[in-house]
Amino acid sequence: MIKVSNYLINPIGNSLHTIRKIFPNAEIIIDRFHVMKVVNKDLNKLRRAAGITDRQSKYLLLSNRVNLKPEQIDKLEVVLGKSECLKIEYEMKEKFREIYETNLKEKKGQKKIQEWLNHAQVFFGSSLVGMLNYGMLN
């Protein structure tokens, strides 16, 4: 008999429920890439809903701020000035990335993620919050 203690998962779709049924005692681990994929998808959806449709704004919003050149940051600020909701959601995305890239002890990291999740429930889709509540972030 094979014992599964951890399971790294692509959380998109209905696989979480199926994995939980097959491996009820396994710890489900959701990696940062898939969380950022959902965050960026929601951010892009909000960008389109705000009527901001040019490709450059999409690139600026979905890129990591630290990778942007000063003139790109200026253009990003113009885009963010068009929608307060978009600005808040963008800042939430950057905060999530920052938490992962900061060297934190495990307990402090979990606390920061939980604080982020508490705010994220308001701005991001229920799919993200449900996904994160269902498994552990890695």
Image: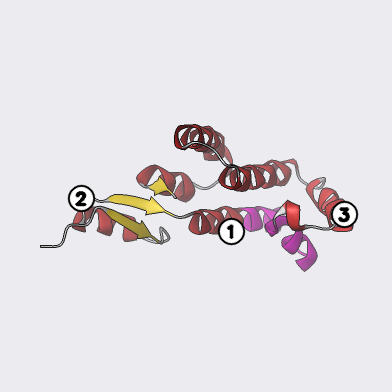
Give the residue displayed 78% in from the left and 48% down from the top. 80
Q: CA distance from mark 1 to mark 2?
A: 30 Å
Frontmost residue, 74 versus 68:
68
Report crowding for label 1: few under 14, some 14 to 19, many 20 or more residues within 10 A (C-alpha).
some
SS at badge 3: helix
Q: Is residue 133 magenta?
A: no
Q: Which mark is residue 41?
A: 1
Instruction: Describe the colour scheme in one phrase.
Output: secondary structure
| Vertical relation: 48 (above or below) 102 | below
Q: Which mark is residue 24?
A: 2
In x, y percent, where is residue 14?
Answer: 34, 60
| Vertical relation: 105 (above or below) 42 | above
In x, y percent, where is residue 37?
Answer: 55, 59
In x, y percent, where is residue 58?
Answer: 73, 62
Q: Which mark is residue 70?
A: 3
Frontmost residue, 64 versus 134:
64
Q: Is 51 left or right of 11, judged from the image as shown?
A: right
Quarter of the image for residue 4 reads: bottom left
